[in-house]
Image (tube, rainbow, N blue to C red):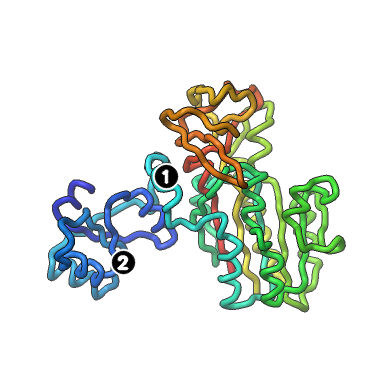
Amino acid sequence: MREQLESIPCLTELPENYRALWELCLGEIWCPATLAEWRERIDSSRKTGIAPTLFVNPSAKEREELTQVFGFPTVALPEYPSIAEVNQALPHRFETSKLLKQSRVATEITKRLKTELPQIALLLVFDGLSFYDVIDWKFSGGRLEPCLVDGLSITQHAMPRIVGSDVLTYRLFELGYTRRMGFSYWERAKNPLTDTLFSGFLKPQLHRVTTFDEFLGKLSEAEFPHPTYLQIIRTGLDSVSHTHREKPNVPALLDNLKNDIMALVDVLREIDTSFRLFITADHGILWYTNQDVVPLANEKYKMRYTEKTCATRENVCTLKSHGSTYTVFLGDSEIARARRTTEWGFHGGISAQESLVPFWDIQ
């Protein structure tokens, strides 16, 4: 396609929710927002050349002019780029990507809720779930888009990044969500991260649950006379990726998580009031596939990053996160040490598998 675009602009149709992901991979290919923008650039005498050009999702009127008047051809692209394409592009555009960024999730949720103010607003966060592992999941009334973990892809950094420094709880209070219910597998008093994530929840508002079914039961029994914000942090695939004696059956585990989401949506619809459900994850998982072992600064503990700044070499970059500087692996081909027999997945680096998580908006 690139060779074709070198000689003539083309048109294509892409799902809007994956457009930013494609633009990440298209690199130097120019995707003008409108026909007028394209005309302005080609008519400018200051421009000495025009980059290869691809019109994405033009309006019906613009499509007719581009094809009938200019004779530009249409090219077909897959619904979304491959993992390999993302891993090739992501290191070069990690900071400039137009993808929804994890650090903007709380702001984005607040912005979307402002438009309708449903009676129930719910945020469900999984610990360890990759965008590409769930890209085929479909939920009625739901829209999936990739979210970029724009920092170190580990739980201690990413979970707080989701709820925001001006935490989502307080932002939604300003919108009228004065009632709140929180659910966690971990006790606030014994887990500082849980305490951070549920900042703003009073003691009676935070419930410890041992299973997702227990949460569903409490939800189905609750009444919602006032606008309510619910937040649940639950396990995803993180625990089985780090410590599991037998090789985990990842497809089966993913099916279980999908069924849990479907059950949650069913309960919300049975409550018979307006709701908006947002689902995301703190980081993805890079599964073990015989990656090359390349030590990072004699790192003995971490598989995909180190808290030291390493000498310049290929396939790594420095990354600032939570006020510190880290060296992280790029792509999916290397790890810093031999894996333990109970380790089946890793995270902390920058790759399509680790750095892209799902963001669902279900109404």
- Is the residue 177 above or below the residue 293 in the image? below
Question: Which callout, 2 or 1, points at the residue further toward the start of the chain?
Answer: 2
Name the side, left or right, on which 181 lies relative to 96.
Answer: right
- Is the residue 326 above or below the residue 149 in the image? above
Residue at disc 1, secondary structure: helix
Name the side, left or right, on which 43 lies relative to 148.
Answer: left
Q: Residue 231, position in %: x, y?
A: 71, 60
Q: Residue 19, position in %: x, y?
A: 39, 58
Amino acid type, callout 1: Leu
Residue picked out by circle 1: 90
Q: Residue at x 67, y 76 (%)?
A: 175
Residue picked out by circle 2: 33
Q: Residue at x 51, y 58 (%)?
A: 144
**Viewer-nearest residue: 206 or 274:** 206
Q: Residue 90, position in %: x, y?
A: 42, 44
Query: Badge 2: how crowded within 10 Å, few (<14), some, or many (20+)?
Result: few
